[in-house]
């Protein structure tokens, strides 16, 4: 985790203090269930909760000092709790194994992280929707292969992003549900030394579902899917960021990141206004995606359990969620303050002498009786003249002067085919599909 790209709420989830507090709750809830089953004295569970009620400070340094000797983090934690609670603590962890604590804790942490990310997505969706409606009918050029294609609206560009991030939200909701499982099944997952009802009790208290077969560890296909979804969200962030970066290029300049008073774009060139935020988001997206492959490789553990996944998850759990949280918040800010230039959009639409209307002419010629091949050739031979003139010539005027075209379409017919509003007639339909009918 790099502090520069971290926000406090998400970072706190991965703190040692939060991890140890979750560990305690798992152990204490399990002891409650064991007491109800008569496996341990009721006084043991009470002693744990009585101590917890004093709101003890989690002494991370003391636990780390014990671990330096034991070389085992869960044992170090249990030893520290026993030193504070006293003799009754010996009944804690009855029939459990370390993975019961570690994996269930990770499920809680990833669920907590997912909740923050879902809230981030809600904020981003709200910003995109607001700006989409603001520019619902703002005409701009659509591009394919980076080349002018046909007119769209800037609102449609943002509606597309809204639909994409809505899918991201749905995927994350499903991934959260899949990752939020509890395993308290003991060594190799057989429940030989602990009743399954303990697992059910802990799961209910922590808001988790029961892992059907934990084999001592929760199956890592769940985690692989979770981090894969984070990677897809990161890719969607990058896609929108790249669009902004392209639109801010000097030759385009249809939109750009907000440039605050006092901000500097270059140490050498005072005129520069660079898309630094969206460039940063492209880099952050790469880092989030980098967690997906290790998470998938973690699926193949030896037999019922090994710990080859453990070191990996200590990296990717915090790093991927913290980075994605920061990236979503940054993108929301970019969209919220995005500077949009409709006049430049119109100028770019007009840049190539009406070439963007070539398909309408092609279709009209076929409707007027020309073959598609002939229609294409008639339009293209005039369009290429406009292209080669760098937009100085007018496609409409060239078509009007072309006798072969005139034999099929009148000047009035041709003029009508160059109506920009024609391309916006279904904007409402698309918006209704994306945002719901008003």
Image: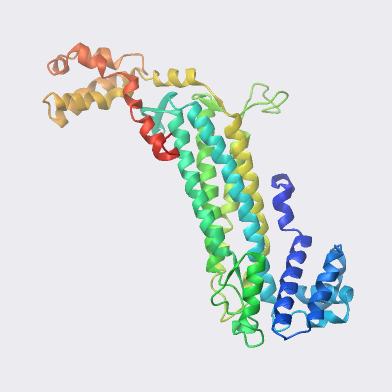
Q: Picture coordinates of residue 10 (x, y %)?
A: 69, 52
Q: Picture coordinates of residue 311 (x, y %)?
A: 67, 67
Outermost residue toward the bottom in this view: 192
152 displayed left or right of 52: left
Q: Picture coordinates of residue 317 (x, y %)?
A: 65, 60
Tell me which colouring the rendered structure shows: rainbow
Any part of residue 122 in sight: yes
**307 versus 111 height, above or below:** below
> Which image quadrant for residue 264?
top right
Any part of residue 316 in sight: no
428 displayed left or right of 85: left
Measuring 45% from the left and 42% from the top, which residue is drawn there? Answer: 163
Measuring 63% from the left and 88% from the top, which residue is drawn there? Answer: 192
Q: Picture coordinates of residue 434 (x, y %)?
A: 43, 39
Measuring 64% from the left and 55% from the top, which residue is drawn there? Answer: 113
- Total labels: the figure holds 0
**145 versus 206 height, above or below:** above
> Which image quadrant for residue 111?
bottom right
Measuring 64% from the left and 50% from the top, which residue is drawn there? Answer: 116
436 displayed left or right of 281: left
**Between 158 and 271, the one nearer to me in the picture:** 158
Work out which quarter of the rendered image holds the C terminus and state it: top left
**Between 438 and 132, the one nearer to me in the picture:** 438
> Which image quadrant for residue 375?
top left
């Amino acid at each position: 985790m790099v502090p520069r790209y971290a926000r406090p709420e998400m970072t706190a989830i991965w703190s040692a203090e939060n991890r140890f507090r979750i560990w305690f709750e798992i152990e204490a809830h399990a002891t409650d269930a064991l007491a109800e089953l008569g496996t341990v004295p009721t006084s043991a569970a009470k002693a744990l909760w009585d101590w917890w009620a004093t709101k003890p400070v989690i002494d991370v340094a003391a636990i780390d000092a014990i671990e330096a000797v034991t070389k085992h983090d869960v044992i170090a934690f249990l030893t520290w709790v026993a030193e504070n609670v006293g003799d009754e603590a010996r009944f804690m962890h009855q029939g459990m194994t370390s993975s019961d604590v570690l994996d269930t804790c990770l499920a809680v942490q990833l669920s907590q992280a997912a909740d923050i990310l879902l809230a981030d997505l809600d904020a981003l969706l709200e910003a995109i929707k607001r700006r989409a409606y603001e520019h619902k009918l703002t005409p701009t050029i659509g591009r394919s292969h980076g080349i002018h294609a046909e007119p769209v609206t800037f609102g449609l560009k943002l509606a597309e992003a809204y639909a994409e991030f809505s899918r991201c939200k749905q995927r994350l909701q499903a991934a959260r549900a899949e990752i939020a499982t509890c395993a308290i099944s003991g060594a190799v997952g057989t429940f030989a030394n602990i009743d399954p009802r303990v697992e059910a009790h802990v799961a209910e208290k922590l808001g988790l579902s029961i892992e059907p077969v934990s084999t001592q560890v929760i199956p890592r296909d769940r985690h692989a899917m979770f981090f894969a979804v984070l990677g897809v969200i990161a890719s969607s962030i990058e896609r929108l960021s790249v669009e902004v970066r392209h639109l801010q290029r000097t030759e385009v300049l249809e939109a750009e990141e907000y440039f605050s008073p006092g901000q500097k774009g270059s140490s050498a060139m005072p005129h520069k206004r660079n898309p630094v935020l969206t460039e940063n988001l492209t880099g952050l997206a790469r880092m989030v995606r980098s967690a997906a492959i290790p998470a998938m490789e973690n699926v193949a553990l030896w037999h019922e359990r090994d710990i080859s996944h453990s070191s990996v998850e200590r990296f990717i759990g915090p790093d991927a969620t913290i980075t994605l949280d920061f990236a979503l918040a940054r993108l929301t800010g970019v969209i919220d303050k995005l500077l949009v230039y409709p006049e430049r959009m119109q100028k770019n639409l007009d840049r190539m002498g009406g070439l963007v209307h070539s398909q309408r002419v092609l279709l009209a010629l076929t409707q007027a009786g020309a073959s598609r091949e002939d229609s294409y050739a008639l339009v293209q031979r005039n369009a290429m003249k406009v292209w080669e003139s760098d937009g100085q010539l007018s496609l409409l005027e060239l078509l009007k002067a072309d006798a072969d075209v005139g034999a099929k379409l009148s000047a009035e017919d041709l003029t009508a085919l160059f109506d920009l509003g024609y391309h916006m007639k279904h904007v409402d339909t698309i918006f209704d599909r994306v945002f719901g009918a008003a």
